[in-house]
Image: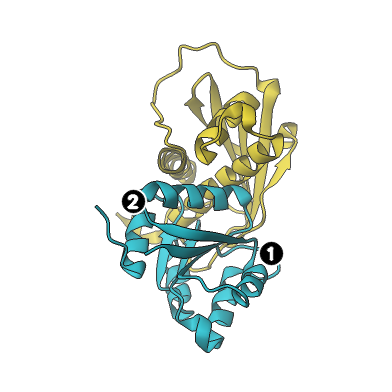
Amino acid sequence: MPEDFLHRVVHESLVDVLEKMFFISILDETSDSVPLPVRDEMAVRVAFEGEPSGSLIVRLNRFVARSIAGDFLGVEQEELSDSQVGEVMCELANMICGSVLSRVESAVTFRLNAPEIVDPDQTPADAAIFSVPLGPAAIKVAMITEAPICPPAAEFAS
Amino acid sequence: MAYRVLIVDDSPAMRAFVRRVICLSGVDVADFFEAGNGREALALLANQWVDVILTDINMPEMDGEQFLERLQSEELLRSIPTVVISTDATSHRVERLRQLGACGYIAKPFLPENLREVLERHLGVPYA
């Protein structure tokens, strides 16, 4: 139950953030494009404090990251610096994390730490990973919490 | 009338996005001012008058809650409409920020229309 709930919440949050802030529609279909290699991924981690505390890692192919950063800032891809792409990816991870945590609202106010770019290979093996197709790649979200995330009491009862 | 808008957020990408959305929404902006946290914003407000403040919550040095408290403690600054833009949409956070003096709250992610509606409400911006 908690994993199904978390999967739904992460998916809803991803779709919401990408559609509203990046103007990208997510289709529940596998792309026909040639998949981009996983080795070209970048990753951003957002640690959070609350009940439970933990961290969320967003992984995305660098080429796709540059593309959506351009859409977000309204700048041509070739004009973007690596630093700007990183800042947008940090903001993307921040919004996904906040959106997920707001949907599992507890009695305690959560606090997000500043997002940081990390090595994609550092994703813990025991993390719950959710993946959504995004063009020729996939956006992957890993959640690591000190305790399972459960549905709010009202939703659990219904 | 052209408005003077202050955007307070530690993310340069988010500041650029908010500025872009406001421009696209058709609000007549005379000047955009930017600050990376509450402390920088207060320093800027010591020399510049603005018509509206859009602020994040989680920021280094002085966060959004501390910034709102400081605005409320200054008679002149208290009258500036201050809208919070944040990822934290939990009801207790929203209620706390209203108690601290925020006149509006926009949860990220948001549609450009949401931002336009809030500016319209607090600035009386006429739209075609």
**Disc on res. B15:** none
Drawn side of residue A26 relative to residue B41, left or right: left
Residue A140 in the image: above or below residue B98: above
Residue B66 in the image: above or below residue A18: below
In the picture, residue B9 is in which quadrant?
bottom right
Residue at 67 percent across and 45 percent down: it is A45
Image depth: mark 2 or mark 1 in front: 2
Ranked by sequence position, the earlier of labels 2 and 1 is 1
Task: Tell which chain the image draws in yellow.
Answer: A
Total numbered labels: 2
Identify which residue, B115 or A124, lies in the foreground: B115
Residue at 41 percent across and 43 percent down: it is A20
Q: Position of residue A60 (x, y in %)?
A: 61, 30
- The chain holding disc 1 is B
Looking at the picture, which amino acid does disc 1 mark?
A: Pro
In the picture, residue A119 is in which quadrant?
top right
Residue at 47 percent across and 73 percent down: it is B97
Q: Position of residue B110 (x, y in %)?
A: 41, 51
Residue at 42 percent across and 36 percent down: it is A23
Q: Residues within 10 Å of mark 2 (few under 14, many from 20)?
A: few
Which residue in the protein does label 2 denote? B113
Report which colour depicts chain B: cyan
Which residue in the protein does label 1 denote? B60
Confirm whether residue B127 shows in the render.
yes
Identify which residue, A103 or A134, lies in the foreground: A134
Q: Position of residue B61 (x, y in %)?
A: 71, 68
